[in-house]
Amino acid sequence: MAKQPMNRKHKFSFVNLLRSPQNPGVFRGWGEAMLRSETAFNGMPAEGSDALSAAEAAKESSELASAGAPTVVTDQPDYSPGEQVLITASGFQPGDTISFAIADDPSDPGDDGDADVYAPFSVTDGGIGDLDGEVNGTVVASWQVPSDDDGSGLGVPDALNATLNLTATGSSGAVATVTFTDSLPAAATSTSTTLSKR
């Protein structure tokens, strides 16, 4: 008996399964979070995925966290020097104070060659600095990517072309981590040509 070709319309797709309206709740949130994680780890969106908005990332992080694991996500996998990173930490105890620690990955410190450790900061769930303003176990905060060398206003930006490790630690002891990168926009990295007079 000859094999029938697979009808593309019925082709199994893990991405479609995860996004299916018949796939409610935590598993759907977990699936979307995994798709986002794939984007964060390899810099390319997963097949069939769209970039998630900060609100979607916060909702999905919260759904995943409700399954018991604290999470931390950024609204993008890559930033340019000087850009704001929107951070969402979920699954922590309501009212927890979350300490954020950001550092260049020692194996990929960027163009300046220094594995910089940036000033840590803390935000209390529902307090000043929590951009969602609710006591709900989720803290939304922002951090600015360095735009110069050690705050001097000069030189190669500290994190340029680096992988950065972000750790969120709750006052209850829960910990979550994520990585993101800092690179120049494509237009800024293109080769320029100089024309000379003859």
Image (spheres, helix red, strand yellow):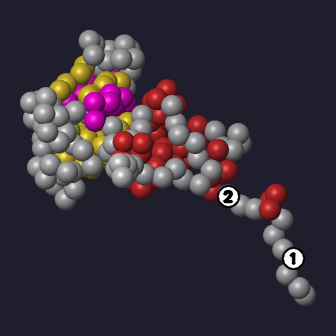
Q: Secondary structure at mark 2?
A: loop
Residue that mark 2 sits on? 13
Query: Residue 69 at what x, y percent from top left?
Result: 37, 42
Q: Amino acid at mark 2?
A: Ser
Name the side, left or right, on which 125 lies relative to 46.
left
- Give me the residue at 42% from left, 56% from top: 42
Query: Residue 135 at what x, y percent from top left?
Result: 35, 16
- The disc placed on residue 170 is none
Residue 167 visible at all: yes
- The residues colored magenta run 81-100
Is there CB contact under 8 Å for labels 1 and 2?
no
Residue that mark 1 sits on? 4
Q: Amino acid at mark 1?
A: Gln
In front: 47, or 2? 47
In front: 185, or 16? 185
Q: Is residue 58 magenta?
A: no
Q: Is residue 5 above or below residue 150?
A: below
Residue 93 visible at all: no
